[in-house]
Amino acid sequence: MNFFLAKTSTYHISQKNTDSITLSQKCIEDGSDYIIGVGGDGTLNEVINGVMLSEKEERKNVKVGLLLTGLGNDFAKTMKLSPDVAS
Protein backbone atom coordinates (compact mmCIF):
# COMPACT_ATOMS: atom_id res chain seq x y z
CA MET A 1 0.00 0.00 0.00
CA ASN A 2 1.41 3.39 -0.96
CA PHE A 3 0.45 6.64 0.69
CA PHE A 4 1.67 10.11 -0.02
CA LEU A 5 1.27 13.37 1.79
CA ALA A 6 0.90 16.70 0.12
CA LYS A 7 3.13 19.57 1.17
CA THR A 8 0.09 21.07 2.79
CA SER A 9 -3.32 19.67 3.42
CA THR A 10 -6.44 20.93 5.10
CA TYR A 11 -9.71 19.39 6.07
CA HIS A 12 -13.19 20.79 6.41
CA ILE A 13 -16.21 19.28 8.12
CA SER A 14 -19.62 19.93 6.66
CA GLN A 15 -22.30 21.01 9.11
CA LYS A 16 -25.40 20.89 6.92
CA ASN A 17 -26.70 19.89 3.50
CA THR A 18 -24.95 21.64 0.62
CA ASP A 19 -21.85 22.51 2.72
CA SER A 20 -19.73 20.12 0.67
CA ILE A 21 -20.66 21.99 -2.51
CA THR A 22 -19.43 25.28 -1.08
CA LEU A 23 -16.38 23.68 0.54
CA SER A 24 -15.37 22.00 -2.73
CA GLN A 25 -15.64 25.28 -4.60
CA LYS A 26 -13.54 27.01 -1.94
CA CYS A 27 -10.87 24.31 -2.15
CA ILE A 28 -10.65 24.76 -5.91
CA GLU A 29 -10.48 28.54 -5.58
CA ASP A 30 -7.61 28.04 -3.11
CA GLY A 31 -5.74 25.89 -5.63
CA SER A 32 -6.33 22.38 -4.30
CA ASP A 33 -5.28 19.51 -6.54
CA TYR A 34 -7.24 16.84 -4.66
CA ILE A 35 -10.62 16.79 -2.95
CA ILE A 36 -11.33 13.68 -0.91
CA GLY A 37 -14.87 13.29 0.38
CA VAL A 38 -15.57 11.10 3.40
CA GLY A 39 -19.12 9.79 3.25
CA GLY A 40 -21.43 8.17 0.78
CA ASP A 41 -23.55 9.01 -2.22
CA GLY A 42 -24.77 12.35 -0.87
CA THR A 43 -21.27 13.53 -0.07
CA LEU A 44 -19.98 12.46 -3.47
CA ASN A 45 -22.91 14.22 -5.16
CA GLU A 46 -22.16 17.48 -3.35
CA VAL A 47 -18.42 17.33 -3.98
CA ILE A 48 -18.94 16.68 -7.70
CA ASN A 49 -21.48 19.50 -7.90
CA GLY A 50 -19.03 21.87 -6.20
CA VAL A 51 -16.31 20.89 -8.66
CA MET A 52 -18.56 21.28 -11.69
CA LEU A 53 -19.86 24.67 -10.50
CA SER A 54 -16.27 25.95 -10.32
CA GLU A 55 -14.57 27.67 -13.23
CA LYS A 56 -13.49 25.14 -15.85
CA GLU A 57 -9.93 26.41 -15.97
CA GLU A 58 -9.58 26.19 -12.17
CA ARG A 59 -10.97 22.64 -11.93
CA LYS A 60 -9.31 21.05 -14.94
CA ASN A 61 -6.60 19.22 -12.92
CA VAL A 62 -8.57 18.50 -9.75
CA LYS A 63 -8.85 14.85 -8.71
CA VAL A 64 -11.83 13.73 -6.62
CA GLY A 65 -11.71 10.78 -4.26
CA LEU A 66 -14.15 9.18 -1.84
CA LEU A 67 -13.57 7.29 1.40
CA LEU A 68 -16.70 5.19 1.81
CA THR A 69 -18.50 5.71 5.10
CA GLY A 70 -22.06 6.07 3.85
CA LEU A 71 -24.95 3.72 4.51
CA GLY A 72 -26.02 2.82 0.98
CA ASN A 73 -22.98 3.57 -1.15
CA ASP A 74 -24.93 2.85 -4.34
CA PHE A 75 -22.35 4.62 -6.51
CA ALA A 76 -19.53 2.49 -5.11
CA LYS A 77 -21.55 -0.70 -5.56
CA THR A 78 -22.46 0.19 -9.14
CA MET A 79 -18.83 0.99 -9.98
CA LYS A 80 -17.70 -2.14 -8.09
CA LEU A 81 -15.43 -0.10 -5.82
CA SER A 82 -13.95 -1.89 -2.86
CA PRO A 83 -14.60 -0.48 0.61
CA ASP A 84 -11.04 -1.61 1.43
CA VAL A 85 -8.78 1.44 1.27
CA ALA A 86 -5.76 -0.77 0.48
CA SER A 87 -7.21 -2.13 -2.78
Image (tube, rainbow, N blue to C red):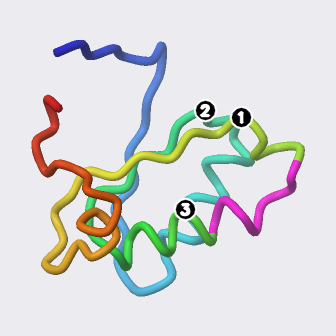
Whole-angstrom CA distance, mark 1 to mark 3, is 17 Å
Residue that numbered label 3 is attached to: 23
Q: Tag 2 or tag 1, which sits nearer the N-term?
A: 2
Q: Secondary structure at mark 3?
A: helix
Specify the amino acid type for callout 3: Leu
Quadrant showing the N terminus: top left
41 in magenta: no
Q: Residue 61, labelled with which disc?
A: 1
Whole-angstrom CA distance, mark 3 to mark 2, is 14 Å
- The vertical placement of 61 against 8, above or below, is below
Residue that numbered label 2 is attached to: 33
- The vertical placement of 83 against 1, above or below, is below
- The vertical placement of 35 against 1, above or below, is below
Residue at position x 24%, y 13% in the image: 2
Report whether 77 appears left or right of 66.
left
Residue at position x 51%, y 47% in the image: 64
Q: Tag 2 or tag 3, which sits nearer the N-term?
A: 3
Disc 3 vs disc 2: which is toward the camera?
Answer: 2
Foreground pick, 15 / 46: 46
Q: Most extreme residue toward the bottom, as rendered? A: 17
Q: Tag 3 or tag 1, which sits nearer the N-term?
A: 3
Q: Would you say the magenta stretch is mainly helix, strand or loop?
A: helix
Q: Please provide the residue range marked out in magenta.
A: 50-56
Q: Are circles 1 and 2 on residues that touch, CB within 8 Å?
A: yes
Report whether 80 appears left or right of 65.
left
Q: Secondary structure at mark 2?
A: loop
Q: Could you say where residue 58 lies in the image, as x and y percent from the top left?
A: 82, 44
Specify the amino acid type for callout 2: Asp
Q: Could you say where residue 59 lies in the image, as x and y percent from the top left?
A: 75, 46
53 in magenta: yes
Q: Could you say where residue 15 lies in the image, as x and y percent from the top left?
A: 35, 77
